Image (spheres, rainbow, N blue to C red):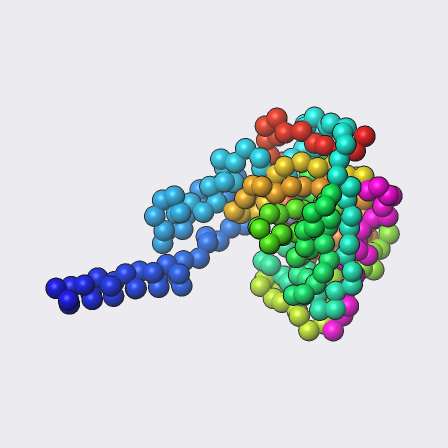
């Protein structure tokens, strides 16, 4: 009996070891975005075997065609963007986008009303994910903020072609070429606020409920979209594409969501 118990325990340990060590989310890429929901993790039993199900069944998915949602002018929370210089930014080639992670201890945050959301990373999509009718933009910048309770807020900025952007060039120049590569020893100080458009006070924005635009497409993400654009040059767009091209999710159903904006 003791031996039986021991062998059961042993088996349980092996199983938990196998699921914790060998279970990895399925590989995905943007070319197969219509079927992200169906990608399977065969090491898991249902429903965990479909870790990206929300991409298919979610009702508040991002991005959207902003022209398809009703825009409501109302009293909205004031937005305060506080992105000081980061002394140890990490230039991270995620395998899906070029990204800059803020250093641990970085104090930058987005303040919405009385609540602060720490800035954890920012990254780029080519072309834009949010569109307005038939108009899309050459690229889109997402500042991602995660609060300690797990809530996510993304600040989105559309990118147009125009003047060369020296701040964006610093990111391109320090980005590792290979998927998964991290450059954490650039020795650079980086100012995330230097990528923002010139903003009036109070800051104008559009906000709506949405999701992550990449698997697992988790909902509960509040989006803040700035109406002002920034620019990069044609040559810089070509460089961005040499890392990742067409890493944009296509617009999702609005499903009755409203966009709120200040009066
Ligand atoms: Zn994004």
In this orientation, which residue lies closer to the viewer: 119 or 26?
119
- Which residue corresponds to the image point at 40% horizontal and 58% vertical from the top-left? 23
Q: Is residue 93 above or below residue 45?
A: below
In this orientation, which residue lies closer to the viewer: 164 or 8?
8
On-image quarter of the N terminus? bottom left
Position of residue 22 measured from the top left corner of the image (x, y, whole percent): 39, 61
On-image quarter of the C terminus? top right
In the current view of this chain or complex, which residue is farthest to the front?
A: 114
Q: Is residue 122 left or right of residue 227?
A: left
Q: Is residue 256 left or right of residue 230?
A: left
Based on the displayed image, in which of its 4 quarters is residue 257 positioned? top right
Q: Is residue 219 left or right of residue 236?
A: left
Residue 192: say if magenta. yes
Q: Is residue 51 left or right of residue 257?
A: left
- Which residue corresponds to the image point at 61% horizontal and 38% vertical from the top-left? 210
Magenta segment, which residues? Answer: 187-203
Position of residue 66 measured from the top left corner of the image (x, y, whole percent): 70, 32
Position of residue 161 measured from the top left corner of the image (x, y, whole percent): 81, 47
- Which residue corresponds to the image point at 69% horizontal and 55% vertical from the top-left? 119
Based on the displayed image, in which of its 4 quarters is residue 12 positioned? bottom left
């Amino acid at each position: 009996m003791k031996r039986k118990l021991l062998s059961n325990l042993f088996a349980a340990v092996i199983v938990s070891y196998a699921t914790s060590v060998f279970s990895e989310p399925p590989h995905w890429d943007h070319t197969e975005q219509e079927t992200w929901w169906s990608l399977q993790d065969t090491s898991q039993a249902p429903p965990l075997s479909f870790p990206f199900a929300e991409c298919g069944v979610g009702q508040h998915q991002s991005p959207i065609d902003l022209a398809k949602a009703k825009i409501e002018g109302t009293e909205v929370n004031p937005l305060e963007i506080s992105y000081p210089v980061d002394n140890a930014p990490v230039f991270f080639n995620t395998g899906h986008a070029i990204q800059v992670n803020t250093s641990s201890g970085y104090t930058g945050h987005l303040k919405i009303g009385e609540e602060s959301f720490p800035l954890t990373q920012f990254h780029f999509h080519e072309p834009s994910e949010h569109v307005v009718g038939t108009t899309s933009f050459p690229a889109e910048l997402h500042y991602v903020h995660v609060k300690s309770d797990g809530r996510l807020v993304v600040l989105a900025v559309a990118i147009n072609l125009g003047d060369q952007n020296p701040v964006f060039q610093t990111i391109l120049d320090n980005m590792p070429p290979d998927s998964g590569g991290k450059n954490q020893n650039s020795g650079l100080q980086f100012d995330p606020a230097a990528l923002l458009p010139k903003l009036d006070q109070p800051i104008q924005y559009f906000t709506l409920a949405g999701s992550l635009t990449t698997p697992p497409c988790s909902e509960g993400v509040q989006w803040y979209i700035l109406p002002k654009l920034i620019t990069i040059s044609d040559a810089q767009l070509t460089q961005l594409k040499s890392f990742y091209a067409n890493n944009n999710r296509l617009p999702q159903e609005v499903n009755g969501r409203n966009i709120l904006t200040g009066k």
